[in-house]
Amino acid sequence: MQPMHRQWIYRRRPDATVGSEHYALIEAPLESTLGAGQVLIEARYFSVDPYMRIGQSGKPTYDADAHPLNVVQQGGVVAQVLASNADGFASGDWVRSYTGWQTHARVAAGELTLLDPALAPVTTALGVLGMPGRTAWFGLTEAGRPHAGDVVVVSGAAGAVGSLVVQFAKRHGARVLAIAGGAAKCGWLRDKLGADWTLDYKAFGDADAMGAAIKAMAGGVDVYFDNVGGIVTDAVIALINRRARIVICGQISQYSGGLDAPEMGPRLLHHMLYQRATMQGILARDYVHRMDEMTRIVAPWVRAGEIVFEETVIGGFDQLPSALNSLFTGEHRGKLLVQA
């Protein structure tokens, strides 16, 4: 029987939360004919990331245009080769691609990265040894510039990027305050990742109370690695020390309803992210050309078991839209993946 090719097509721009109603799931018989230099791949794991929601904004962000409608939802994928008409790739090989939410793809060989499952689990290519790892490493080291003894505050600390920033900051000798939602995540950050202090933002109703708790624990803030924005950032910015470095990596509190009409005050910082302003906004794409540099440093730590890279894996291609929405409800820890 000829296999079916399934795709999630992005049809309608969400105003607030995103779900399956903004997509169309289509199926067609798989066309497996390959041209010269092409490779046929079958997706095994799909990366689900907050930036996908940014691309659905109705206004320009860090791309000149929004994610186009009526095309496959973009995203990173770990796949296996089914057939190859290109040198260097054979059936069964594991690869990383950017072929989005579809079960199969015919890809030019130059658009694939060959993975070695003997060196690290293949899923790390979408996490600690992929885009989140690159974001955490260069965002912290180049924009945050942590020094031994600094106080580094990380919001969204239980997520794919934040959990790595916590560990990288500790390796620089910093003292780390990790902010996340719920006692379980805070316990994990403290007991497994080595955070010096943790704070459950859900326990606070306003920025003043949260800021008082942060000050009581850590005093002032030398580096703030912000993944969240909102009242968390309202609380932290009031506590920065002289020559503090603020790294704007994400503003996830604004992504479900606040992208096109953001809340006022420091919550406008997602514009700092888009424009890479001097606070400083950082994007993973700014460091793509330095991926090998990050891998040389971080991969040995991963292989030695010195870095915690927890993954939340949701089963089923059909679950992709709901998985994307779950990023904004705090239902996962570490890197979020969907397994085909």
Image: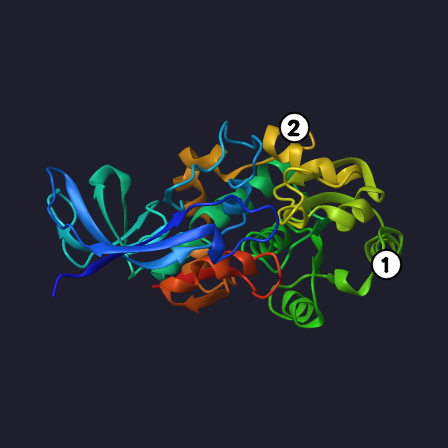
Disc 1 designates what residue?
Answer: 213
Number of marks present in the image shown: 2
User: From what the image shows, is residue 69 above or below residue 339?
Assistant: above
Q: Amino acid at mark 2?
A: Ala
In front of the other: 67 or 94: 67
User: From what the image shows, is residue 275 above or below residue 241?
Assistant: above
User: From what the image shows, is residue 210 above or below residue 249?
Assistant: below
- Closer to the chain start, of discs 1 and 2, is 1
Disc 2 designates what residue?
Answer: 277
Q: Residues within 10 Å of mark 2 (few under 14, many from 20)?
A: some
Q: Amino acid at mark 1?
A: Ala
Q: The C terminus is located in which quarter?
A: bottom left
Q: The N terminus is located in which quarter?
A: bottom left
19 horizontally vs 318: left or right: right
Q: Residues within 10 Å of mark 1 (few under 14, many from 20)?
A: some
Separation of residues labelled 1 and 2 (CA atoms): 29 Å
